[in-house]
Image: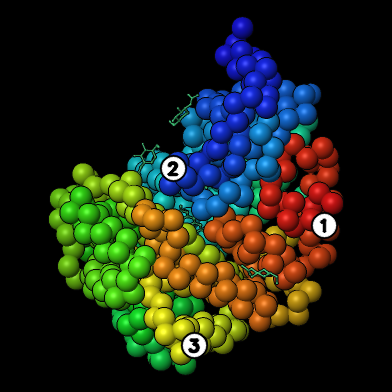
Amino acid sequence: MSSVRRYLLLASAALGVVAEPYNTFDGPGFPACRDVAAVYNVTSVDEMVSIVKDAAANGYPVRPSGKGHMWYDTMCQDDPRTVIIRTENTNGISDFSLEPGAESGSVVIEAGVTFLQLAEYLHENGASMGYTLVNWNISMAGAVAMGAHRSSIREESMVAAGVLSLDIINGNGDIVTVERDETNDDWLAASTSLGLLGVIARMKFKIYPDFKVFAKQDIYDEDEVLNGDIYGMIAPYATANFWWWPYLKKFHHRYYDEIPETLSDQEGFQSTFSVTDLEAAAAITILNSGKYLETSNELIETIFFGLWSAPNFHEKTTDQTIYTWPVYGWNYDVLIGGLYPGQKPEWEYGLRGETLELAFPMTRANDMLKRVRKFFDDEKKEKGITMTSTYRSGINIKFGKPYFDLLGQVTYDTSDGADWSKGAIMFDFPHFKPSIGDGKPYNADFYPRLAKVLIDEFPCRPHWTKNTREVFGNATKNIDPDHLARFKAVREKFDPSGTFKSVVGEILGLYD
Ligand SMILES: Cc1cc2nc3c(=O)[nH]c(=O)nc-3n(C[C@H](O)[C@H](O)[C@H](O)COP(=O)(O)OP(=O)(O)OC[C@H]3O[C@@H](n4cnc5c(N)ncnc54)[C@H](O)[C@@H]3O)c2cc1C
Ligand SMILES: *[C@@H]1O[C@H](CO)[C@@H](O)[C@H](O)[C@H]1NC(C)=O
Ligand SMILES: *[C@@H]1O[C@H](CO)[C@@H](O)[C@H](O)[C@H]1NC(C)=O
Ligand SMILES: *[C@@H]1O[C@H](CO)[C@@H](O)[C@H](O)[C@H]1NC(C)=O
């Protein structure tokens, strides 16, 4: 008997018996799914197909998972019979094609291929994935499913924008190939599918010749951004973003663009999440005390701001710290990088967070940031509470070029009448989750209250893996009903019995 069969019999026999949470990257206490019957580490697309066929025959739910790099309990539906297909070990890369002198080419990747893995493979072959990438050790299929994106107004930065075609295992266990075609609702739904059409088993992905970039960072007073030409500070660059320090009233402005290969021999390598034992121990002590003491939060923001002003880059060849901007290096190393040798990502030290991310029309960028500022000021005025950023890189303000599909954060021509044609500004507010007491952040209800104000006062769209159920519930009114109806029709075709249902899909009304 094959291991798949044996496992499936086991899973079926165990239905309703051993349900336990399936956790996010943050581990125990951070469920992505509240109760699942089994997690299966598949090693081939065929295995995925047989699990889905068995699920279809026996009526239990399935969700695929890459690396669990999401924040809340919104991956599955709340059904303890749920089976997780873990894609990490199905990670073949094939059909590399990039002709000498060609502007672009393509490569075929399986569901579990991560950005780090593909970037390394491409670099070795003189290629890159351009700007259609996100931060970290995340599966590309998981990123495409949830509409993930980098920060860019000038260049395509939805990961889905790099997809040429998708192989989806539908609710019957059949593999359906969906080609990029903006006139076809199947494609427009598959482009940001929320995993509701089925398992993205393979993708044909667009690639480019490898290239070098610079990274540079400036510091602004808050006023200069809140009242400034935000579009003009972001749109000229291949990729750019802000980090906001609300206590210090400062912004970091980070921007990147292509350079001639011969400009510099530097091989800068970025790390956003690496920390040393010493740094982690210091940070966690101050951050945990900030659960009760406002002054600790002010101190940590000041420390983080100082650290974040220097380049978070090492020279790749020697692992030496780089002290001066601009930094130069190869595309992926500079745009994303990874972990420094001998260091661990912050969450492995118990530095954990909650977040909240919403996208607004670029035309409302100044209004939105000023509204947030007013919310901070009102908290001070009305309650005497100073709120700060308790995340090592501040509040992340990102941007997105318009990209049309049904449920993406940067789509346009929607019934809200808002002008999304200049792109979107995203407000991503990660904050420290203490590991002491009740585990709630300082003044914890500040964040949902802020979310409510933004959702009620602006046209805005949630990031699909960085918000709570409650935020999704409230934000649904801002999603175009016609897009939802068209998506639902495709969903019913691909997955008529709702095998792949998630709480996000339920909240959006796609199963009513
Ligand atoms: C440290 C960190 C950095 C991040 N940086 C960014 C960023 O820069 N930009 C951004 O937009 N987002 C970012 N994210 C969010 C991240 O891109 C998404 O949460 C992404 O979906 C995670 O992919 P994963 O492979 O870990 O999937 P999981 O977390 O395992 O799954 C996420 C969702 O995708 C579904 N899914 C996974 N694989 C498949 C598949 N093969 N087919 C269909 N559905 C699937 C799952 O069922 C689940 O609903 C970040 C998250 C973290 C934790
Ligand atoms: C699946 O892989 C994960 C990560 O490597 C591991 O923690 C887990 O124990 C594996 N599960 C099984 C059933 O092998
Ligand atoms: C990415 O994930 C893989 C598998 O879980 C792990 O072996 C690797 O160390 C990770 N890489 C980084 C940079 O975290
Ligand atoms: C969602 O809406 C309800 C009802 O208006 C409100 O009580 C709640 O605070 C809102 N939550 C968020 C996070 O917006």
Q: Which residue is mark 3?
A: 382
Report whether 467 appears left or right of 69. Answer: right
Report whether 82 appears left or right of 96. Answer: right
Q: Quadrant of residue 118?
A: top left
Q: Residue at x 28, y 58 (%)?
A: 284
Q: Which mark is residue 27?
A: 2
Q: Which residue is mark 1?
A: 486
Q: What amino acid type is highlighted by mark number 3?
A: Glu
Report whether 71 appears left or right of 53. Answer: left
Q: How is the image coloured?
A: rainbow
Spatial separation of the CA atoms under disc 2 and disc 1: 36 Å
Q: Residue at x 75, y 76 (%)?
A: 416
Q: In the image, is residue 329 above or below residue 172?
A: below
Report whether 40 appears left or right of 51. Answer: left
Q: Quadrant of the N terminus?
A: top right
Q: Going from the N terminus, do you reach mark 2 or mark 3 first?
A: 2
Label 2: state its secondary structure: loop
Q: Mark 2 near mark 3, Cβ–Cβ under 8 Å? A: no
Label 1: state its secondary structure: helix
- Callout 1: CB less than 8 Å from ligand 1: no
Q: Residue at x 59, y 26 (%)?
A: 18
- Tally of numbered discs: 3
Q: Quadrant of residue 267?
A: bottom left
Q: What amino acid type is highlighted by mark number 1?
A: Arg
**Outermost top residue:** 1
